[in-house]
Each structure stands twice: as structure tokens, then as C-alpha cells.
Image (tube, coloured by chain):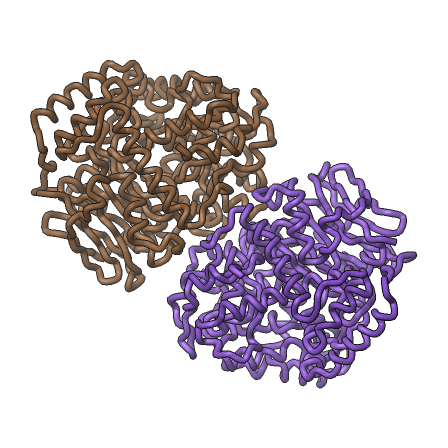
Chain colours: A brown, B purple
Amino acid sequence: MSLKIWRANVSHRTVVTEPVPQSWERLAGRALIPRILLDEIPPTCDPLGPFNKLVFTPGLLVGHMLSSCDRISVGGKSPLTGGVKESNAGGTTGLKLVHLGIKALIIEGEPADEGWYVLHLSTAGGRFDPADDLAGLGVHEAAARLLERYGKDVAIALIGPAGEMRMTSAGIQNLDKDRVPSRIAARGGLGAVMGTKRLKAVVVDASGGSAPPLADPQLYQEAKKRYLKALLSHPQTKVYTDYGTSAVAVMCNGFGALPVRNFSLGQYDALDKINGDALRDTILARDGEGDTSHACMPGCIIRSSNCFPSPEGKAVVSPLEYETIGLVGSNLDIDSLDDIAMLNREMNDLGVDTIEMGAALGVAVEAGLMEFGDAQRAMELLQEVRQGTPLGRILGQGAATVGRVFGVRRVPVVKGQAISAYDPRAIKGTGVTYATSPQGADHTAGLTIRANVDHLDPKGQAELSRGAQIKMAAYDTLGACVFSSFGFALDLDAIRDLLKAQYGWDLGTGEDILDQLGRETLKLERAFNQAAGFTAADDRLPEWMTVEPLPPTNAVFDVPEEDLDGVFNW
Amino acid sequence: MSLKIWRANVSHRTVVTEPVPQSWERLAGRALIPRILLDEIPPTCDPLGPFNKLVFTPGLLVGHMLSSCDRISVGGKSPLTGGVKESNAGGTTGLKLVHLGIKALIIEGEPADEGWYVLHLSTAGGRFDPADDLAGLGVHEAAARLLERYGKDVAIALIGPAGEMRMTSAGIQNLDKDRVPSRIAARGGLGAVMGTKRLKAVVVDASGGSAPPLADPQLYQEAKKRYLKALLSHPQTKVYTDYGTSAVAVMCNGFGALPVRNFSLGQYDALDKINGDALRDTILARDGEGDTSHACMPGCIIRSSNCFPSPEGKAVVSPLEYETIGLVGSNLDIDSLDDIAMLNREMNDLGVDTIEMGAALGVAVEAGLMEFGDAQRAMELLQEVRQGTPLGRILGQGAATVGRVFGVRRVPVVKGQAISAYDPRAIKGTGVTYATSPQGADHTAGLTIRANVDHLDPKGQAELSRGAQIKMAAYDTLGACVFSSFGFALDLDAIRDLLKAQYGWDLGTGEDILDQLGRETLKLERAFNQAAGFTAADDRLPEWMTVEPLPPTNAVFDVPEEDLDGVFNW
């Protein structure tokens, strides 16, 4: 069974399958999204209008429960940035889509009425089921009802109230392997795009489906074995198993790059209350549903996720990630893991990006809407979001809109998207990524914190970022979690062999493959953004970060603009 | 006495005078603004940050009380559009600045403290006076206090609460010849820029100053006489004397281009209650302070302004313009001149652009915040603006932000700035102007309604708009009111002779002068916008106007994009 394109039209409520166009064949995941957008939508279209499309496309390696390689890429024109958007997530959506033979699901058109629908996909094809009863529900309740309605074995991608209200901080939640709707394709407001299509959820019933055929099963098994061995042997794998992403908090703080009090400081005096050790110790100290090492996708051996329990041992949120600790914790001067977990769960339930919302709340403090450290007030503000009050609508649009509406200058965004938990003044390579990534500010587009360089020195950061951006674009195209790189880095030829074994392709060796996939992806994304009106003027950090020193290093962002403009002159 | 540049620095609270750089000498008014911005600010700077500058520059002909030719251009990088902004106004500011020998007043820097100040200019130089007592006051009360403080003969340019709150619908009000603060440099949010500089007002005391010297006084008198004769002989002069701009309402409605119910209709069934006849009849029927023909600048013989009285004969607002009737009247389905006048006065007092706020309220209706026709609710919403509530802050940012925050699709803006009272689907040449003007949507950048063409035919509209844009840029550079063109059109050489008589320049003849001035202005503006990151993708009308037919003509905007992109390929 060869993979197909499934096209769901919300105007006519039809789903048709089509062969894969030749020029799309070698693409998938992140790389396929700008290709589809360039081929099918006017680049200047209104992202929340009828001409935008929402694309779900599993990466190239998805479908075989290969550890950390079953991620789903979701994309479209971003209503947050106005440019191309790919946002990927773990969970089971990618795997199940591939098991139905779906290379890409393209959701298009303008809804014919004001009803809410579920798009149901199975071996029988696709159909639209009325779902007005789910309107307004948080993702936890909505997912529970959908699982009851459609069975326990479906994958679900769904939006919360934020996406329904077309808020540009809204992402798309996916079930993890334990059916918790917490694996969010968070960034860039794709939940709002799904909201404009009036889809509350996409439900994927893969029963009767199967993993895609392999061109060379023996080579596949051999390459898989090498990859898993390399992955298990990498020291970071164990660190992420034990601590998850929170391990990075101490490191980032050490560089003076932790976001603290709306990016006004780079080190946090209360970090020991919310860092990786505190998180692990708290989970271990509490009986019940807590878990320090939890897999988001079936087959993952890193299990960097966690489950944070209440003092009574009830699961509060899974996972509690470093980015949330940074943006919702230190950035708001909230130094209690219980408070951070409570806010995280609420944001998950609303279906919003915790990075965007954490940054928005930081700007809200400067606008006088709350005080730093006031978790209860933050929770109240999230209720405003849920209720869709004017204030909640402002917050739900993300940090840039909060800054715009209240006239705040210290707004941490690039291309309208919030900067994540690495202050670019003190990790300048990542600052270059924030500035120049076609995705807007996003550490997952090319984090440089692990490079053995002076992160405060502006020299060489553009090259560093370029390499990181190319690699990350490649991993996102493979559908591989960033942590799979612990394994692939030790055996890059495993990527070549896995692709060859699955598709029969010969894509070069080692670094070349990542280079090839990453560059093509970035080239397509840049082409879309250029057609949408982006120029070098958009590849800039916020002005205030170039003049306001960040204590304690007192660094400003001083990578020359020529360097920024040269990142993609390769 | 040769004209000078006055530079006011709000960081150090100093005002210095400088000679005019050679490359600025032949420029003034609208043309000088992009030149100064290109020379002095980073094009990508934050418009509400310390690197933006606010420029006041009288046009080339200003200073002699030549009828309709004493306008003041105010400019800077627009916080509404992100591009170059020139917004001009009548009143007395231009005249008095020239009488102090000021070619351009450049306000720059970052305020050293949170206090509010008045910038006072006189023959003794410039100084900053504390003005915290004026903070939060509407412009009527603030102007009254300033006149008391500084004497009855000063010119005043000031902001209301909206500008203080850095709202991007905020303009800068100027006193008219009767000391009413109603001549607003309305568009593009320059009031917010003034707010970031923490200036409540610029007060110009020209006592001891004088009109600039003339190179050839005899030629000046002769050319002036010819111009006035031509102006008086033009039939439109009498129409505008009797009806003001409201004369255009019936014409625009006839073309099906009146904004009705948030630009969803092009003709208004209640127009006869708010059109030019109704306005004139109402004013004439009421005793007291009403006036059908009122001059905004000393020396104006057209006197297109008016003063709208309450039923009791008290002055409510001056002027009540067609644009306000369109955006606040038919656009909101408010069919009472008394209601429109009340809202207009309130907007004036807040110091906001009535076009932007009228459009914002139209979008607010679609967001469910008010009903069409509900003037009381509109008034309540303006109180939210005054109080700076979250809802008020949203509205105060203008139509684009209201649409963004509430997820409304039918938002009438270009480059973030509201479309004025000519629906571009039915007056397509003006649509080309909206789309391509470096200023964002603005009829004063090139209105085409009087051209003898089929306004529904997309063909030839780009050429029509180009000619109109060039001419308007020239008139804005001269400091000449658009209605002066009634005179100049009949004797274009009068422009040549006036400039020659004043400056000794020889600028060609007839159309050439307008062409030369206009093209240079537009070229500079385009250069600034390009450096700020604008591309052809920004030169587009809102997508929905290209697909949603406008009853009763059922026109969509269908001027080809190639035509739009060719407007400045001259």
C-alpha cells in the first residue's frame, strides 16, 4: 500500500484520497508543509481565512515505532507570524495516520455553517461527524468524550476553547500513548486555523491499517538495531530519562540566559525550587500517579517526559517541560512547581502554547495586569482566556498583541512569536536562530546551548545557528524527536540506511543526508515567507534586546545584522 | 531670516537650532518627512521606542496666509502601519512654526522620567515645561488650560488620553483659527509617538516672529492674485463653502461606495438623514453657534469646515466631515447627525482618528460588542477607551487590532490602517491608492472619485491612482489643502510662480511641478518603507474585499495584482 494524500474539504464535508504528486514524494513532515503551501495557497492570504490550509504530515521515518521517530508535523500559514508554520508533536497521531496510509492530510475550504465537527479517518475513509456538544470544552473533557465515542484505540488531534476562539496562541493537542491530550503542536497558532475550519478534533482510527511496507526489511532491522544501540550508549539519553528537559534549567541559568521576570534578568535566585532536581525529587517523594520518566510515543526508549503529581499523588500534568518552567516559572517569578504544574495543566486544557502564554503573562505584568509571583492571579487571567473576555482575548493572542494593546516595550517576540526559554542575549547562537528562522522565535528551530563556544561572543554565532537550523529542519522532516539525535549523531549512516530500507532511496551518507533534507526544508520555507512579504527586516530580534543589558552578564544582542542576513547565503 | 531645523531632545530636555542640511533644502511638509526618517532613524526601529522621531514640518507654501495653504505635516514611523507616516492638518500650527523660522521641528530621544511635559517654542527658543497637571485630560480641557497659561495667541498641537496611552488610533490635535483643538493630524498613530516622548503639547508662541522673506514680493502678489481668482471661479469652491466635505456623501452613495454596516453594503437607505443637505439644513435651522461655512486656517476663502450645533444652539463639534459621517454614521448604521456629532466630539476629545475609530467600532459590532445603530453603546465603548480598560485599549489600537483580537475577518484595513469612506470595490482607483500608498489606506493619498471613468471597471485604475497619488503628494508637500487644487488646477503656473517668488527656485511649469514634487515624495516614502521591510505583499487590499461582493453593485476588488505592482514603475 503506497501512501496517499487525503484531502478534507470543510465546505462540502468531503474527504478524498489522491496519489502523491511527484514533487512531494521525497518530502514529508516539516519539509512537505512549505511545498504544499507554495503549491496550493496564495502566500499573502489571510491565515484565518478560507484560503489557508491545515496540513498534518508525519515525518519520513514515522510508522514503525522506531524510538523517538513517530512525530507528527502540523502546518499552515501561521496566524501568529504571518509566515510558514510547522509545529510538531509526539503522541500517537503520526503513527496512526501512517497506518492509514496517509502521507499528508490537507484540510481546506470555508465551513458551510457554524457547526462544530469531528473529522473521522479510518480504513473506510473520512467523514465529518457533528460535534456541537464538544464546543467550548477543554481538551481533557473533550478527549474523554471522544475516546468514549470512538473507542480507546484512536489517535486524536484536537483544539481547546482557545482554538475555537481563533486565538493565535492556540495549538493542537494530541493524545500521548496513555491517551492524555498533552502532546501539543504548540507554536504559531495552528489551533486557531483548525478553529476557522470548525473542526474540534481529528480522530484517527487505524484499526485494519498497518505500518508502511519496507523496501528492505533486513536492512531496516539492522539499521534500527545500530540506532538503538547508539541511542542507549549516549550519556545524554540517561540524563533525559531521569530529568527530562528540565535538566537544561541549571545549565541555562549558569549561562545567565534563563528568562526571569519578563526577560529582565538571566539568573533566578529561586531556581533550586523549580529546577530538574527539584522536579525529580518532588515526583519521587510523592506516591501515586507521578512518573519521572514517561514515554510520549509508543516505542520511545528515552522517555524524557514525566508526569507531575499533586501532593496527594494525583496526576496534574504530563509533561512538565523546561520551556514551561522557564516561561511560566522563572519568567513570572513563580517559584512553586505545584503552581507551575497547575498553570501548565490549565494552559493544556485551553489548548494554548505554554511558551506563548507564559511570555504573554510576563508582558501582562508590565502592563499592570498582575504582579510577578502571583500564581493565583495568573490562574484568574487564564479564566479570562477561557471565558473569552476582552482581556482574555488579548492574552490569548500572545505576547506581541499584549504588548501592542497595552503599549509595552519589553516584548520578547520575533515575527510575532514568543522567544522561548533561552535569552538570546546570553546564548547568541540561539538568538540568531530566533531572528532568522522562517518559523519565528523558536528554540527547536536550532538550539545552540550545547555547543562548546563562548555564547556571549557575537562572532561565529551565525555559522553555529546555520548548522543547528539545518539539522533541526532535517530531524523535523524525518519526524524524529530532537533527542533521537543522541543516537543518530553517533551513527549518522543509520538515517541513510533507514530511509533506504523503507523507501529504496539513496540519499548520500552521514552529515550529507541531514544537510540535504535540512537545506531543502529551509529553502522552501524561506521561499514561502518571501512570497508572503518577509524580508531581512523581519529577521531581527526585538530592538530592546539590542540595547537593554541582561544581568548578570549585562550582555546585549550584538550579532551584526550582516551576519544575520548571511545565515542563509550558503 | 532663513528657516532652521529645531531639534528637541526629550532625554536631556534641550532644544537646539541647526542650519538646514543641503539635501533637505528643497523639501518640506510631506516630502521632508521620509528624508529625515531615512537620514536619522533605523527603518526597522520600534515606532514606540526611543529611536523613532516625531517631525512637524510646514509645507513649502506655508507662512503667508495664502488661502488653504498653511497646513502642517506631522510625521514619523507609524506605530499603526510600521511604515512612513505623514499626517497633515489645518489650523494655526504650520503658520506659527514658520513665523518662528522653523522648517522642521524634530522631537527625539527617550524620556528621562515619567513626567508629562509641554514643549514651548518662541523667539526665545525652546524649553520643556512640566505638565503633569494636564495628564489624562481631553484635548478640549487641556487646550483651554494651555491657552490660559500661555496666552490666546499661541498655536497648540496636543494629544488626548489616547495618545498618552500610546494607542495607535491617536492623532495630534491642532487649534483651528478659533482656538478649538479639532484640526487633527489624525492618521497613523502619531499621537502615540508623541505619547512615547511624554509630550502632552507643543505650544508655539510666534509673537515677535514673522512671515518668511520673499525673494520676489511683486511676483508673489501677482501669483497670489491669480490663484485666488482661479480658486473663486471654480464651481466646486462654492459647493465646499456651502456643504463642506459632506457634499460627497450623495455622490459616493450613488456609486454604491458608501461604507455601510462595516463595509457590507455600498448604499445607505437612511442617507437623507445624514447627508450634506441634512447637515446644512440642520445647522441653518438651529440658532446659536452653528456655522455652515467656517475656515480652519486664517485666510482661507473656501471655508469648507462647519460647526455643528446642538438643538439648543451650542457648538458640539467643528468640523463634522464626510469621512466621519461615513465611518461613524452609515458604517455603524447611526442615522442621526446629533449622535454622529456627539461621537465625533468625544473622539476629538480623546484625540483619536474618527476614521480609525469608526472602522474599529464597525469591526466591534461583528465581534458582538455592540449592535449597529446603537449610538449610546458606541459612546460607552468610547468611555472604555478613555478609561483604558482592556476593551478600550483594544479599540484604541484601531480596526486591525480589534479584528485580530476578536478573530473577525471583515476588517477594512491596508497596512494596518483603516480604509476611509470610499469602498474600494466600487471606486477602484481609490482602491489602488489604498493598496499601494506608502501611507496605508488613505483617501487623501489619492482620491479618484471625481475622475470621469467607470469606477467599477478595473482597467486603467492603476494609472488613475498613480496620477492622483503624485498630485496629492505634491499638494501635501506644498502644505496646500486638497481644495486649493480647485484654484491651482486652473492655473498651475501659479505654483511655479509662488515658489519662485518665495524661494527663488525655478521648478519647471504647470503639471511638471506637481509631478516633480509628488514623485520625489513618493520615491522617498517607498524607500523608507522598503528599508522597513515592506514589499509588494503589503500593497494589497484585504483578501475578503477581493471575494465578497458589495451590494448593490456586487463588485469585488479585481484590479490585477500586476497593475498594483506597476503603480510606481513609472
Q: Residue at x 53, y 81 (%)?
A: B270
Q: Which residue is nearer to you in this view: A543 or B35?
A: B35
Q: Is residue B266 above or below residue A465?
A: below
Residue B167: give x, y in percent of width and height. 60, 52
- Give the side of residue A244 with respect to residue B354, left or right: left
Q: Residue at x 51, y 62 (%)?
A: B567
Residue B88: give x, y in percent of width and height. 68, 61
Q: Is residue B342 above or below residue A34?
A: below
Q: Which residue is nearer to you in this view: A123 or B469?
A: B469
Q: Which residue is nearer to you in this view: B418 or A551?
A: B418
Quadrant location of the N terminus of chain B? bottom right
Q: How many labels sit on residues?
A: 0
Q: Is residue A497 above or below residue B131?
A: above
Q: Residue at x 77, y 52 (%)?
A: B202
* Residue B132 shows up from this direction: no
Question: Which quadrant would residue B45 be assigned to in this image?
Answer: top right
- Give the side of residue A132 with respect to residue B448, left or right: left
Quadrant location of the C terminus of chain B? bottom right
Residue B301: give x, y in percent of width and height. 77, 76
Question: Which quadrant would residue A485 be assigned to in this image?
Answer: top left
* Residue A567 shows up from this direction: yes
Q: Residue at x 72, y 63 (%)?
A: B507
Residue A497: give x, y in percent of width and height. 16, 26
